[in-house]
Image (cartoon, grey):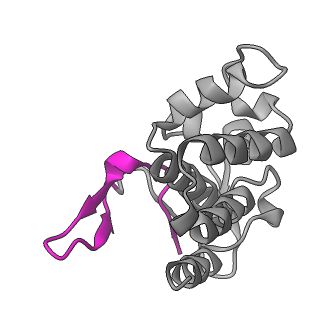
Amino acid sequence: MIIHRDIKAGHVFLDQDYVAKLSEFRTSVPIPLGKTHVDVEVITGTHSCLPPEYAISGRTSEKSDVHSFGILLCEIFAGKRWDSLLIWFMENSNKGSSSSYNELEFRQLANLFKTYLEANVLEEENKKQVVECAKLIERCLKTNPDDRPIMTEVAQSLRLIKSL
């Protein structure tokens, strides 16, 4: 298994058939067969998008990429960059102007994102899909990596959401 370590909008491109392709594998690391994670000494990636366990300890796994993918989904649905969303979250939380969403209670972040979607994205014709996508994003952004889905579950969920 290969862990990308820097999934973000700038590393996703569309081919001629509008199929998304992930690029920029310079920071990727392999996880040896039979292992679930790798501990790395040099932490790379976009600082504001790093999963908590990776930013703190250098431990990376498939669940790290799931977290980063959750941030990418946030950006797609909100139509804003993660940094801008963090500012909005901080301004609308009781934590004041902090620099990291890790300082927010996870439930508060999920509720703030739901509020943001309801105010800026939700329309009657796409309500079911937006609500289900928000739930998927919430699962991807869980603080504890053990509570996040694996990437194949994320893909299955997206296919199901598309069919709604």
Q: Which residue sits at x=23%, y=71%?
A: 18
- Residue 19 in magenta? yes
- Can the viewer see residue 139? yes
Residue 51 % position (x, y): 66, 46
Image quadrant holding the C terminus, namely bottom right
Q: With 117 as the anchor, is 45 left or right in this view?
A: left
Extreme residue toward the top, this view: 97
Residue 58: which quarter of the image?
A: top right
Residue 150 % position (x, y): 67, 74
Of residues 82 and 58, the one nearer the viewer is 82
- Can the viewer see residue 47? no
Extreme residue toward the front, this view: 124
Asked if residue 95 is positioned above or below residue 38 in the image, the reply reads above
Q: With 58 as the anchor, is 14 left or right in this view?
A: left
Q: With 104 as the anchor, is 35 left or right in this view?
A: left
Q: Which residue sits at x=53%, y=75%?
A: 1
Magenta range: 1-24
Q: With 95 as the anchor, is 112 left or right in this view?
A: left
Of residues 163 and 76, the one nearer the viewer is 163
